[in-house]
Amino acid sequence: MKKKVLSVLLTVAMTASLLAGCGSTGAADSAPAADASSDTADTSADASSDTAASGDVEEITWMFWDDLDATEDLISKGYKEVIDRFNSDYEGQYHVTPITTNLEEYYTKLNALVASGETPDVFIVSPGPNLTTYVEPGVAADLTSYLDADWKGSFSSDAVFAQQTYDGKIYAVPLNIAAACVFYNKEMFEEAGATVPKTWDELIDACEKIQAAGHTPITISAGTAWCLSMLAGYLCDREGVDLTKIESGEESCNNSKTIDAANKMIELSQYFQPTAAGDTNDVATAGLYNGEAAILIQGSWAIGQINGENPEFEQKCGVFQFPEIPGGNDPNRVIAKSDSLAMSSTTKHPEAAIALMKYFTDDTAQKYTAEVGGKIPVTKVEYDASKAPAQLADVMDIFTNASSTFGFYNESLFSTEAGSTFDDNMVAIYLGEKTPEQAFDDLDAWYAANKK
Amino acid sequence: MKSETKKISAVKVLIYIFLCFMVVIYLAPLLWVFSVSFKTNGEIFTNPFALPESFFIDNYVFAWTAGKLGIAMANSLFVCVITLVLSMFLGSTVSFAIGRMKWKLSGLVMVYFMMGMMIPVHCVLIPLFTRFAKIGLSNNLWGLILPYLTFSLPTTIFIMTGFFRSLPNELVESACIDGCSIYQIFGQICLPLSKTGLFVTGLMTFVANWNELLLAMVFISDDNKKTLPVSLSKFVGPYNTNYSQMFAAIVIAIVPTIIVYCAFSNQIVDGLTAGAVKG
Amino acid sequence: MDKLLKDKKAIAVFVLPAFILFTLILFIPICQSIYYSFCDYDALTKPEFVGLKNYKNLMIDDTMKIALKNSLFFLIYSCVTQLIMGLILAGLLTNIEKGRNFFKNVIYLPCVLSSAALGLLWMFIFSPKLGINQILARFGIEGPLWLMDIKGYITLPMWVIAFVALWQYVGQSMMLYMAQISGISKSLYEASYIDGCNRVKSFWHITLPLIKPMVGTAMSLNAIGSLKFFDLIFNMTEGGPNHKTEVLATHLYTQGFKYFKYGYASAIGTVLLVLCLIMTFLINKLFKSENYEM
């Protein structure tokens, strides 16, 4: 008898678990099935869920991709100051708790929170496909009405919202802008008799002279794929590649302009440091500030790192705009990247969230952005140019004279994976693994297979 | 005869030279990271192999405090100890039932548990991640403990079943005659006699979980809940990496294990080997 | 006595907690994962059944081909080299007395260390500006790009990673063989010396045949371990350059947690699962049947 009971019990347990499995897979997004809840009843008290019980303080969360305490990044440090200032100014009314991860895992963690219905009230996001992922399913809130009320006027221009606007509605607020420029070692240029190049031929000429003077002309990282891809992006744009047409499928990736751009990249690669293929971003940047190479093509966020690691280099470091390719596109276009904040559409405390976002764009924060962080502020704030890094003035010049800006190529394609595929193919061209034709054909094939 | 001993000793010398070479290959990287961890970022790039100019302790202070490696170590310890205790307990009860008690389905249940040995954790990563996110177990140390426990059960059960089966029948019989209940037989007689087994399985569980990266990386995002292997990646910032502190962090991550290992190396090596032989 | 040992209630108390846990955390998720592999599913949408689409995409996915190739390379490499190196080390160590423990413990040490930390460490050692290339440069040798070279069917970075894996885990194989060798009765060797065998010969004719079952155990550990391999690659190259060092586990991670293609990643997971089952089955077939001879 007992035997039977046990075997029945086991069978029941087995089938029940099977059913539970199937049931929960069938409707995976229904309420959590009863199965696992027994283990967890007492453990689900999550830090982020509710501490709001204390009085009437409105608790919000802010999610960010760098550890605020461990970071060396000046911009991240500035964000920490903003958070501290907000919490002390609004004490008793609002309180924000940061959720931090590292960049690598950021979107994984954000998506997990979104999926579990605990979207952080305010979160940082890169404009481009990443922001689109949150705008399309309605995770990010429409901020237009808040901005129009009394906020938008403080921004330097409406153009700063270009990458955050979808159908005329603004879904994220930019905090700062970094522009990709060419940094160079003035001393080395002088010694080699090279001048600041305006055109492609002059760039090649300058590299030639620097090499003749016994220095490495260019330090770049192909180990960190996006660094090389940034150069490829500039070359493509200067050649006149129209990314929107490629995205919409009107043009093939493999066209005369992209091929020309890739061939120029190969031509330039003879001036790279010999270890470019293996060097990471940091090592490549160190190559410039340690005086091993003359030219670095990098985003202006590198200024903080350059001056921080070698303060003596600040005065030797010049900046120029990526040269023109005669017969190509407008040479005053600049690659720009902004950090942007989005608000959860399901936040219970929109006022607190907006108040926090305004703290990121107030004069104190924006002054810090320019003077310490070395990035371009998004508002009309007055800052003390003498306190700001020497290179910022040049970057500002380039940026204000820019006819228009465009995003990183890898962040302008329809998905993150498309961006990585682009990066990887650029590295493959550089390493000689693929010819430009092969690489762009592969990109076309990838698009055909993956774009819906 | 004399030439014979000479020949043998020549061979011996060769063996020792080879082994010393192996020791260099094994210890040099560890010593190198130790030396680099005392350097400043600038020193690392300009002269990675020289001894550090001065002992730059700041890397360690920074890695320990701001990098939250202290917290990470506490988290790792918490997760591993709880998993260890639970897996020993749950594993040995099952093993006792399978190894000593008489029931029809015991063979089948054993096969069911042994299935776990072949299944890589990657296969359950996505379902667990989505499920845990919904019930508040992601970003929660218990969300690590449950899968760690589950994946350590198969080996524990395999080894412990062997131990329980090897116990002499007379022991259980005499206990029965003395009027012990089945729970007493398990807890007071069989379990104490299987200490070696517990030690071996405990060691295996602890070492495996202490070093586990993938689950911890996917499940935990809160800095205050990260375990040691995951915390190492913290020094890779958005646009730059803090090399010297990363080296200090690597040292902090491996030194406790090395210290424990040095103190108990023979037991650990033999224990883990015994576990692997049976597993 | 029998009554006591057939106590159904006690059996239930003993078995059920672990059984339920196992079902919830392992069995159900496996079923779910297999179901997801037939779905279009990303982080922010619900799974939608699409039949074999993910598997069809796997067939034409170049990265998947590389990952599969690398995983199989890794499997074969680690089985072969661990066997050879493990046997050599075990053979040498059982033949010396002085310092045996020291050498054994040093070689075993990396097995208990975090492969995440060791991966980072080796990444730096093989990076062009920091590591061995700097030493080589002192002798006027220009070292290769250890972790970035892309030439060849199996690229250099794969060999480097495979070497590091051997470095880390050979201690385990060595110990397994040593345990088995020290179990062989001394009289067998003495008899063989009387018959005129030297040490090498006796190793060949006595030791090898007698440790054959252990070879099976060690191999199955290596095989499953190398298919699961993730930490070292993730921290050394993250699958790069251009996916040349991708293995199944890293490909799964990238697709699942970088691009959030849960359905597709589940399909990769299913392939991995099937491979693991096949390997276990094969090794059992090859070695387990002879296990009883000892």
Image (cartoon, coloured by chain):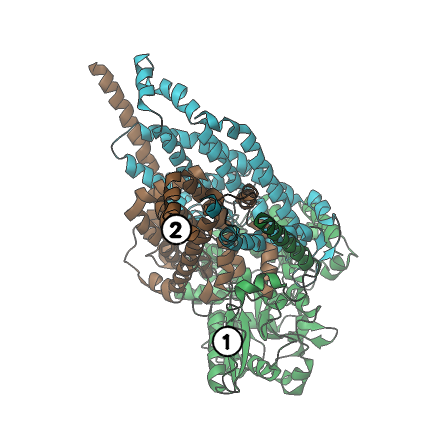
Chain colours: A green, B brown, C cyan
Give the mark toward the camera: 2 or 1: 2
Q: What amino acid does circle 1 point to?
A: Thr
Q: Is residue B227 left or right of residue A246?
A: left
Q: Which residue is mark 2?
A: B180
Q: Residues within 10 Å of mark 2 (few under 14, many from 20)?
A: some
Q: What amino acid does circle 2 point to?
A: Cys
Q: Is residue C279 left or right of residue B66?
A: right
The chain that hosts pointer 2 is B
Which quadrant of the figure has residue A330?
Answer: bottom right
SS class of the residue under badge 2?
loop
Q: Is residue A417 left or right of residue C179?
A: right
Q: Residues within 10 Å of mark 1 (few under 14, many from 20)?
A: some
Q: Residue furthest right?
A: A250
Above or below, C247 against A388 in this view is above
SS class of the residue under badge 1?
strand
Q: Quadrant of the N terminus of chain C?
A: top left
Residue A34 visible, this angle: yes
Residue B61 pos. (x, y %): 34, 64
Q: Is residue B205 left or right of residue A411?
A: left
Front residue of A17/B103: it is B103
Q: Quadrant of the C terminus of chain C?
A: top left
Residue A249 pos. (x, y %): 78, 56
Residue B204 pos. (x, y %): 41, 47
The chain that hosts pointer 1 is A
Q: Which residue is mark 1?
A: A97
Q: CA distance from mark 2 to mark 1?
A: 56 Å
Front residue of A410/C134: it is A410
Residue A203 visible, this angle: no
